[in-house]
Image (cartoon, coloured by chain):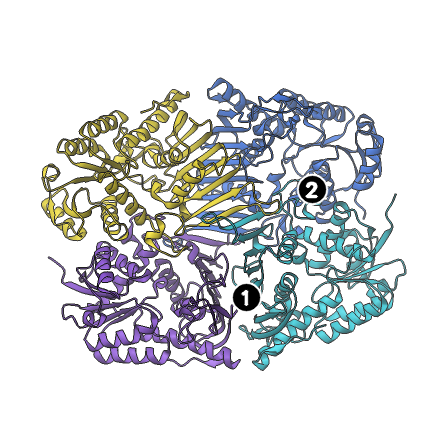
Chain colours: A purple, B yellow, C cyan, D blue
Amino acid sequence: MRKPALNIGLIGTGFMGKTHVFGFATALRVFDLPYEPVLHSVADRTPELAASAAAALGFAHGTDDWRRLIEDPEIDVIDITAPNALHKEMALAAIRAGKHVYCEKPLAPLAQDALEMALAAEAAGLKTQVGFNYLCNPMLSLAREMIAAGELGEIRGYRGIHCEDYMADASGTFSFRHDPAGGGALADIGSHALATAEYLCGPIIRVMGDCVTMIDSRPDGKGGTRPVVTDDVGRAFLRFENGATGSVEGNWIATGRKMQHDFEVYGTKGALTFSQERFNELHFYAAGDASGRRGFRRIEAGPEHSPYGLFCVAPGHQLGFNDLKAIEVAGFLRTIAGETPEPFGFRKGLGIQTLVETIQKSSAARQWLRVPQG
Amino acid sequence: MRKPALNIGLIGTGFMGKTHVFGFATALRVFDLPYEPVLHSVADRTPELAASAAAALGFAHGTDDWRRLIEDPEIDVIDITAPNALHKEMALAAIRAGKHVYCEKPLAPLAQDALEMALAAEAAGLKTQVGFNYLCNPMLSLAREMIAAGELGEIRGYRGIHCEDYMADASGTFSFRHDPAGGGALADIGSHALATAEYLCGPIIRVMGDCVTMIDSRPDGKGGTRPVVTDDVGRAFLRFENGATGSVEGNWIATGRKMQHDFEVYGTKGALTFSQERFNELHFYAAGDASGRRGFRRIEAGPEHSPYGLFCVAPGHQLGFNDLKAIEVAGFLRTIAGETPEPFGFRKGLGIQTLVETIQKSSAARQWLRVPQG
Amino acid sequence: MRKPALNIGLIGTGFMGKTHVFGFATALRVFDLPYEPVLHSVADRTPELAASAAAALGFAHGTDDWRRLIEDPEIDVIDITAPNALHKEMALAAIRAGKHVYCEKPLAPLAQDALEMALAAEAAGLKTQVGFNYLCNPMLSLAREMIAAGELGEIRGYRGIHCEDYMADASGTFSFRHDPAGGGALADIGSHALATAEYLCGPIIRVMGDCVTMIDSRPDGKGGTRPVVTDDVGRAFLRFENGATGSVEGNWIATGRKMQHDFEVYGTKGALTFSQERFNELHFYAAGDASGRRGFRRIEAGPEHSPYGLFCVAPGHQLGFNDLKAIEVAGFLRTIAGETPEPFGFRKGLGIQTLVETIQKSSAARQWLRVPQG
Amino acid sequence: MRKPALNIGLIGTGFMGKTHVFGFATALRVFDLPYEPVLHSVADRTPELAASAAAALGFAHGTDDWRRLIEDPEIDVIDITAPNALHKEMALAAIRAGKHVYCEKPLAPLAQDALEMALAAEAAGLKTQVGFNYLCNPMLSLAREMIAAGELGEIRGYRGIHCEDYMADASGTFSFRHDPAGGGALADIGSHALATAEYLCGPIIRVMGDCVTMIDSRPDGKGGTRPVVTDDVGRAFLRFENGATGSVEGNWIATGRKMQHDFEVYGTKGALTFSQERFNELHFYAAGDASGRRGFRRIEAGPEHSPYGLFCVAPGHQLGFNDLKAIEVAGFLRTIAGETPEPFGFRKGLGIQTLVETIQKSSAARQWLRVPQG
């Protein structure tokens, strides 16, 4: 029996737009989904770009008017991968049109916008998803399960980072990522580190931030320069609701680092360490192992670590980044079908945005701040 | 403008059957292919299984008669992921029917069969592909390019292995993989190590084999036991045409190893090491680096390493195993379109099969043997 | 020609006392020292313990009176490895007696004591050394040289940690390390991370501390419990004089960690990473390497990295922890002979103590503090 | 009570001579030895060199006549670190003079010489030691104990290598290491890999060798060239007495490798992997660990791994190469005192030499050979 179709309307055709398309294509084959996602329409800036994107990405239709796409009654899900500054307007329009919304992170430049979006979706009873793809890794699910099951004992300490180097070159042009509203390394990638921290250890309730700008002006692309006030490095001390303490760093000028989304979590009975640089592995220290035989175990991803087995029945073969996106897609489709709760809906996206802003404010105020809980 | 459709008929719906489907789905989205591959028909053992596989995998049709599938004039490419013992019969039928053939490795249990298959395809002017997926890794392409460009100088030494542990449990049942015709660890996974060795360093011309059976009987699945004569470990000393010497090991009882497809290659000016356990990395030692600053560089896969950039524009995000299959698929489609030569056609599959058999014969004869060149 | 003897008087025979003895023994053989260090006398708590320590460690004499040892006119250098609380009294007595002083870290429980000690030694024109042994690693010297030579460009970011788990067990008894005066993880091992940070990147001028007690009471060894107020984890944000920013963590409840004295330093042209867990390696990323060939180089310690070559003429053989202590000893003897400046004298020990206290004060006050410069 | 002195006479003052001196100095401090080793005399080629070596290394006397040193009645132990070609003559003279003999590896260029030496020592009832220092690593002792205790189950497979690159440069001068009698990579460093293999898994009873010369002539140091017939790479297939099979490689032209003395050993219940590049670690896979939690454990050396605790009471601090030599020295002194059997006496050195020669002969004959058992 054929699955009901779920028509997807995509806005934005850049890096993340393509990744979403790959995610839908893979999810469709790998998972037993409640719907068959159909690449219905894609919006881009001009009719030509839209047509070319539709052809390249496999959508049936292309349009240069994202509002029309949102209002197209055939479309069930609006998928937003446009620049951050547009997320709010697009999402609210989609919600008004009664569509479920899948939105790339960050949900919005400002927490107050994110709140508005979350409230609107909740009021409308629509399902939402924010793209924190690193959380979709089976090894992160494993880590979370191990922590929840008490395999590490009581959690005491956490260290999380997300460092890359794509802004390390001071001659790189000022972009929307440097925009004082919603920009900076902490918002852009530190947010991933924060999401992982909460995914594993639960709510962060107090923070002390340290956001620094190391490259204080950049070419404006028109022959001049433009001052930069957003952070290149955003650090924070953390207090978790469960009593653990920790720290986090987001850094986009870490020369040589391409994907250092790493964490270490220490409990009374064990510890876990992880690096996205080798994201099909989780390292586990069990204090209860026999004396002289203890050590961090390099656990390789395999079919025991759901949903790895749907991608590959044999261990050690490894998932790729786009597979994480397919897991994200599958989770959202199940949510839409009412099978599972929202894995990472707008409310959680709001939570991360709130954390980011609280850290930024704490840094500016040079004092610890309590994190408003959603 | 719409791409011409290329109708795929798949035989076999197990691990590799699914992987091929994932490969087609991903290739379609990631690459600018000369054709649009269409999942036309799938064959399985019963009408029910075929119907269910068609639904699950996204084929338009299912059939319990692989011969009918092969002869279906709508189908352009026959994709064989059935048990090895059937490869020959199926491939020859497909060739007779004028279809291009994509066949999982090993091409056939015996080299003489593989030769027959290669000759048939060549005589018919049809394109073929054998599934040596590990070769499709951009980091292996990089290694090959570096060697070809002389970045390592003259190649002197090679060490290759492919070790796993899926047969380590002696209580595992006798399977077709233990069949004296075409079975054993050397044929099953040592063949990958051999393919990589030749991919990087060129033809192997002489070998001395050491194939050993460590578990000499296994449950027959009917309450009795059955003797095993195929190898659990297959080793060989190698002589390459280019003057280098080396060794290789295939081992399916290497407790703890899930995907140790590793190599080390040493030249006069540098060296490379690689492990499939971390297959988005290649380690490169440049003897010409400054004194006191030399060391193996951990190169992480990125857009500089084609075709990584089609999957992801940012470095360090990583490809997964199924992505390698998508690269394989794309290569075959381009071959069919006449854009590129066969990346790994039946003739090369024959070459690997010949190597495997020569090593086995050498082991039995306890003497060095010259490898028949295709 | 025989070297002049330099008579050593050791106070304290525990872990560090033995390590110093190993250091003297090895330094004597490995280096061309200006003196021959002679193990003259050792002090312990009772005559019996002193006699036994003298025999076991190879000293000519043993005494239960450390004051007598200090005043023995035959002794040239007083080597203090007694509990921290006694460092000041012993060091001042040694200085009054005109002896050079080699003192284990921390120099004193409080910075004001360390200052008194530094001033006394300087006024007397005597040479001093504090035992920050990790700095004696040739790979740290290499890192420092590379940074000083501009091989990383301008330094932008630093991350340092020193985590172990020797206090992770909450049933461990209250010890002098938990004493409010001078105790805690930050003072005990975070101090090493601070010393390394300044060794590599120069003075730290402002800090924001976060010192937390996770195990708030411990058995008192007499059947009761005793409250703990010193930190189990001490973190800080850092500002360096050179404009870089960073962070540091000392943690003695990091389950599974035995010697995670690690750093990462990021500059405009390159980066270095290091772990004491593999301390014969330094990892170096050169942004100037060719495209597609960049990656962290694993530089292994060898004779190019002075003074490794004095220990072993061949690369890759590796130094051990006790060898670091021998390098420390050699440095001090050369300082006494006037050949080189003090590598890490009391003034620098005071600097670390000041940093530790400033971080602790900052944590208590919940605000950034300027670090008093010596 | 003072330990009885044991006077050492050293012949040879190069790399290994110095290492032995470091070993004696460290062993004296670290271990509770049955004797106090005294650096009595050293022999070198001229009176001046001998005097200078005595001063530099801390010997009481120097001589240019090694025969006189051997016959000096004050000397108890003759320590031979002279070129291999002289080992036999020196050792036999020492045995005739009634001295215990400590000899660097290889024991002799030819197994027949080694046999003569072993028989002479045994007939005289003297103790002997051959310098296979890598075996003295506590992590190798741990591996051996784990295997002996059945923690890996029945051993099935072994892979050992010892690769370096000190002969990779073809412009390096012909040396005694290239001498057809006793030279070549297999003898020089492959012998270490063989010693480790037997140390862990017991006697090797059959071999198939593959010894290749890649650089077939070298400068003779006098402006001409000299042909090289010894191997640059020596490989072998192995059969162990316990039923396991394996392979080994010695290679001194492995560009980039400084100390790749590695092994992997696979059993029915677990596996171990090790690299001398990180020799304070042993990696252990326990097949009995819980599903989804299995992985190679990185066990770091600590006091549980005797005799690490004598060097350092805290885990993770690490031993260095010279510490391994101290452990070797301590073992020999205990043997001389009758406390323990010979850890690696001439009989075992003969065994390794026999293995090396059998592999070389096998390679030349191109056939499997049985290894003569001592």
State which quadrant residue D349 falls in. Answer: top right
In the depicted structure, whether residue B307 falls above or below residue B244: below
Disc nearest the viewer among 1 and 2: 1
Quadrant holding the N terminus of chain C = top right
In the depicted structure, whether residue D10 falls above or below residue A316: above
State which quadrant residue D229 falls in. Answer: top right
x and y percentages locating residue D3 in the rendered image: 79, 44
Identity of the amino acid at label 1?
Ile
Residue C179 in view:
no
Identity of the amino acid at label 2?
Ala
Left or right: where B280 falls relative to D263: left
In the depicted structure, whether residue B371 falls above or below residue A374: above
User: Looking at the rendered structure, which numbered label has been put on residue D330?
Assistant: 2
Left or right: where A217 falls relative to C189: left
Residue B124 in view:
yes
Quadrant holding the C terminus of chain C = bottom right
Left or right: where D39 falls relative to A284: right
